[in-house]
Image (cartoon, helix red, strand yellow):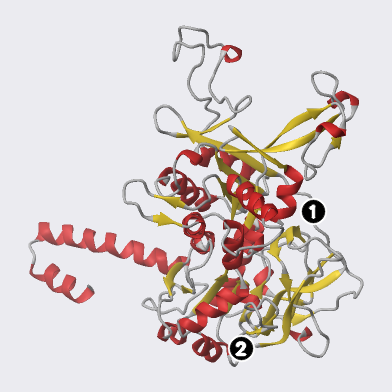
């Protein structure tokens, strides 16, 4: 630039020479200002600019990794997807957001030829790596979350120890919600995170900390119902966490930012052990979960709505009279706001989880439900807490093409669009009816079984929509499987009934089934 500008300036006329000099100065100013702003991170040479770190994302195709992508982008870094084993060795830094079940994750890693390149990458602990959830669990030698008929399944064997299941006789499984951390190392990955800030967990299996075996790997531990487990690890440049930073709000974003900045500025390996009380405990904190009923209005737009006995249209109570709107005393669909902007508002106000329920999806399949998929994609760009979506999670046949989509494929569409959990409603009632009719035999083919097998039980939520059936006496309930509930006086029925059973409904509450809510809950579990 300098050389050719110098030649042109010499041979140019006086008028053109002044114009060229001014142009050259305008070109130089941005270069000089960029150099000045980055001078603390680079050498004094004008041409030695800071190289941007590129993150290699190991997305093996299961579950929601969209939020991890968005968290990396929010920290200001570019992403390169790992699509072949050869890319692993050339990566500057790898982030492995393991989602789903251990057996599925390891099976996919093996089938794609990633296992040995990953072991080589992690061998001497000098290559930057961040594993999330299963991305941490797979670092251990083995796990009890193994294929049917096998006691354990081998992992990458980077960290000594076996991943085991929480004891269901002593605690509710999975461990799900916001919990704290007990620090065992002082690490730059937590440079932007306060020690008392909780992070989001959702897992049924955990890695125990065993003194003399893997305690030197422990970065933090967490306790759940008295059971201590490793919640994050670090040795050298290898970092991994059991919690989900991409679902832990601003705290999680700060964790991702701290890790990537530590990689970039060379401080990642500067961790130091710290003394920790053996009696230190953490506990789950209460959560605020926002549920948004979503449906299309008369113009085809998705809106958040609410109804009275499933009637979501404006009526006399809303000031709509006969002769307006539809001419029947019922107006348009109540519009409480747009799903993405309303969800973002609740997130900013402190919601810990947001659930979208498409209350009209029983009329169509999720395959045509592109607006709902787009809602998830847009929401995950700015909302970094768990997103649950429900409505239409079932097997479905396209009436035009005749192609059949099973429930797992339908759920996968939602997961890839940004959902962390799917809520099964009507299909869970049908599955429970079949389960009871068969005498308690599982087929392995229900939506509950197939989805939880691939994505883990923590990714499946059962949504039960019941209504009361009032009774004057227990003998009036002819089905012995129905659980009869005694009501308080202020909850009595219209004729003073003090007993009822809760009847499950399907299709958005429009159809009642002869099965009670307790039976569906137990069968689903």
- Quarter that holds the C terminus: bottom right
Q: Give the residue number, with chain letter if any, for mark 2.
A: 125
Q: Position of residue 492 (x, y in %)?
A: 84, 24
Between disc 1 and disc 2, whose residue precedes? 2
Q: In the rendered view, would you say 291 is above or below 109?
A: above
Q: Position of residue 111 (x, y in %)?
A: 47, 82
- Quarter that holds the N terminus: bottom left
Q: Position of residue 480 (x, y in %)?
A: 80, 43
Crowding around mark 1 (Cα neighbors within 10 Å: few <14, some 14 to 19, many 20+) is: few
Q: Position of residue 432 (x, y in %)?
A: 66, 51
Q: Could you tell me which residue is drawn at 52 percent across and 52 percent down?
A: 380
| Front in this rendered view, residue 353 or 13 | 353
* Residue 22 image-quadrant placement: bottom left
Q: Could you tell me which residue is drawn at 22 percent across and 59 percent down?
A: 23
Q: Which mark is residue 285?
A: 1
Residues at marks 1 and 2, CA–CA distance in whole angstroms: 34 Å
Residue 470 appears left or right of 295:
right
* Residue 199 image-quadrant placement: bottom right
Residue 370 appears left or right of 462:
left
* Residue 439 image-quadrant placement: bottom right
| Front in this rendered view, residue 466 or 201 | 466
Q: Residue furthest right?
A: 279
Residue 420 appears left or right of 477:
left
Q: Secondary structure at mark 1?
A: loop
| Front in this rendered view, residue 438 or 151 | 438
Q: Secondary structure at mark 2?
A: loop
């Amino acid at each position: 630039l300098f050389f050719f500008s110098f030649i042109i300036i010499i041979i140019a006329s006086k008028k053109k020479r002044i114009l060229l000099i001014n142009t050259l100065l305008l070109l130089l100013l941005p270069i000089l200002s960029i150099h000045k702003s980055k001078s603390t991170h680079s050498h004094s040479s004008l041409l030695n600019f800071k190289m941007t770190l590129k993150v290699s994302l190991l997305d093996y195709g299961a579950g929601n990794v969209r939020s991890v992508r968005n968290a990396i982008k929010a920290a200001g870094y570019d992403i390169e997807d790992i699509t072949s084993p050869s890319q692993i060795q050339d990566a500057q830094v790898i982030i492995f957001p393991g989602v789903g079940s251990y057996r599925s994750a390891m099976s996919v890693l093996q089938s794609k030829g990633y296992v040995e390149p990953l072991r080589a990458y992690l061998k001497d602990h000098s290559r930057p790596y961040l594993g999330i959830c299963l991305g941490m669990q797979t670092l251990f030698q083995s796990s009890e979350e193994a294929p049917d008929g096998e006691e354990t399944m081998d992992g990458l064997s980077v960290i000594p120890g076996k991943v085991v299941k929480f004891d269901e006789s002593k605690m509710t499984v999975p461990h799900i919600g916001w919990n704290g951390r007990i620090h065992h190392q002082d690490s730059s990955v937590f440079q932007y995170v306060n020690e008392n800030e909780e992070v989001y967990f959702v897992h049924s299996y955990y890695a125990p900390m065993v003194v003399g075996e893997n305690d030197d790997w422990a970065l933090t531990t967490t306790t759940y119902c008295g059971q201590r487990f490793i919640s994050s690890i670090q040795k050298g440049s290898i970092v991994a966490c059991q919690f989900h930073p991409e679902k832990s709000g601003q705290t999680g974003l700060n964790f991702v930012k701290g890790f990537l900045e530590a990689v970039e500025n060379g401080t990642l390996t500067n961790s130091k052990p710290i003394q920790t009380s053996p009696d230190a405990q953490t506990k789950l904190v209460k959560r605020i979960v926002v549920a948004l009923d979503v449906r299309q209005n008369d113009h085809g737009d998705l809106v958040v709505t609410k109804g009275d006995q499933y009637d979501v249209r404006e009526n006399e109570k809303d000031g709509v009279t006969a002769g307006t709107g539809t001419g029947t005393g019922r107006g348009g669909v109540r519009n409480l706001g747009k799903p993405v902007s309303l969800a973002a508002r609740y997130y900013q106000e402190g919601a810990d989880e947001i659930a979208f329920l498409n209350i009209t999806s029983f009329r169509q399949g999720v395959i045509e439900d592109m607006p709902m998929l787009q809602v998830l994609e847009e929401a995950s760009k700015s909302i970094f807490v768990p997103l649950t979506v429900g409505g239409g999670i079932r097997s479905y046949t396209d009436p035009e093409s005749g192609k059949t989509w099973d429930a797992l494929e339908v759920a996968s569409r939602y997961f890839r669009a940004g959902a962390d959990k799917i809520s099964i409603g009507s299909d869970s009632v049908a599955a429970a009816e079949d389960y009871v009719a068969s005498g308690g035999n599982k087929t392995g083919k229900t939506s509950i079984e197939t989805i939880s097998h691939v994505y883990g039980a923590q990714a499946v939520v059962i949504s039960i929509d019941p209504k009361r059936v009032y009774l004057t006496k227990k003998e009036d309930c002819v089905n012995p499987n129905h659980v009869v509930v005694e009501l308080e006086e202020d909850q009595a029925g219209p004729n003073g009934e003090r007993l009822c059973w809760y009847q499950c409904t399907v299709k958005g509450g429009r159809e009642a089934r002869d099965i009670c809510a307790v039976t569906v809950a137990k069968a689903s579990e």
